[in-house]
Image (tube, grey):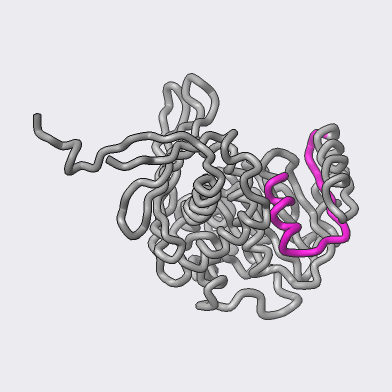
Amino acid sequence: MTDVRFLTSEDVNGLATPAEYVDAVREGYRDRGEGAPAEPRTKLVSADPPGMLTGYMAVLPGVGAMGGYVYAAGFGDRDAHFFLQLFDADSGKPLALFDGASLNPYKTGAAGAVGVEALARRDAETLGIIGSGAQARGQVRATTTVREFDRVNVYSPTKANREAFAAEFNEELDASVGAVASSAAAVEGADVVITATNAAEPVFDGDLLDSGTHVTTMGQYDPEKRELDATTIARSKYVPDLRDRAFSDAGAFLGAIEEGAVDEAHVHAELGEVVAGVEPGREADDEVTVFDSGGTAIETVAAAHMLYEKAVEADVGSGIEMFPASEALTGE
């Protein structure tokens, strides 16, 4: 029998800072860059009732953990439910089971921040963000731990949402945060652009990007989702979280291939390869770079292991008893 720690969203809320998430996720991607196995999401779609069951996994020996997400979205409940399973990478024993919903913006934001750290100019001063929901908030909180921005411009189609976002982060950040009236205004003059939407069509014109801009896009987890246009992809040094995912569900990249703007060789490297120093990141100040973050178990497992260790130290969570197969499969 093994004692497994069950951690609710309430248990893990506030357990770690955005910077601690970034540190953990950086090490997860370094592990991947050094050869740790990870697979893109598998997605099973239901037409009636409409919904999807999704999962992805990673083994991170350097981090010391393995596991992944399984979540259901849509169906009759018209909501999403996340289970995160964490195992010890040496023994294979289960360590924890998470209600994974609340950590999602933090671990995804941390992945975006690692992309910014690896690919954006070090002197980046202006951040443009398109989107104002929970994922956009997670991206800003994490990204501002790896670059010191003087100005943050946020655009959301709903005026009240972008103004509320600006007011919240003006209180939270040292940077001046303002709501702007268009995506073009968020992009023009930005050193870093983050798109955190569920858009099916490009949210800005790639010709508006200044030379040297870095773009993090994190809504590209379906062939029909396309936050970036073919111009942006073609102009960029393109770095996905996982190479295989770029060819399965990275909508903007697949769209650029379909339009003939790029070919499969346009993938420069995986983010982990850049973090581990296997491949170069930014090589010139005038390069346009893109980190395509569609969600992987790399950031999920790395963040979860960090939270698990903090939960053990703080004695947070409750216990579940689980039997190994040698005890459970009795044949009786």
From this view, report whether residue 160 is shown above or below residue 293: above
From this view, report whether residue 308 is shown above or below residue 78: below
Side (left or right) of 181 relative to 62: right
- The percent coordinates of residue 43 (x first, y second) are 42, 41
Q: Quadrant of residue 39?
A: bottom left
- The percent coordinates of residue 285 (x first, y second) are 75, 77
Residue at the location (59% across, 66% down)? 238
Q: Quadrant of residue 135?
A: top right
Side (left or right) of 209 relative to 196: right
- The percent coordinates of residue 57 (x first, y second) are 40, 51
Q: Quadrant of the N terminus?
A: top left
Is residue 250 among what the camera can see? no
Outermost residue toward the left in this view: 332
Side (left or right) of 123 relative to 240: right
From this view, report whether residue 38 is shown above or below residue 324: below
- The percent coordinates of residue 99 (x first, y second) are 50, 35
Q: Quadrant of the C terminus?
A: top left
Residue at the location (60% across, 56% down)? 111
Residue at the location (47% across, 70% down)? 33
Foreground pick, 330 / 103: 330
Looking at the rendered structure, the number of numbered marks drawn on it comes to 0
Is residue 91 part of the magenta span, yes or no?
A: no
Q: Quadrant of residue 266?
A: bottom right
Is residue 123 among what the camera can see? yes
Is residue 147 part of the magenta span, yes or no?
A: yes
- Residue range corresponding to the magenta coloring: 137-158
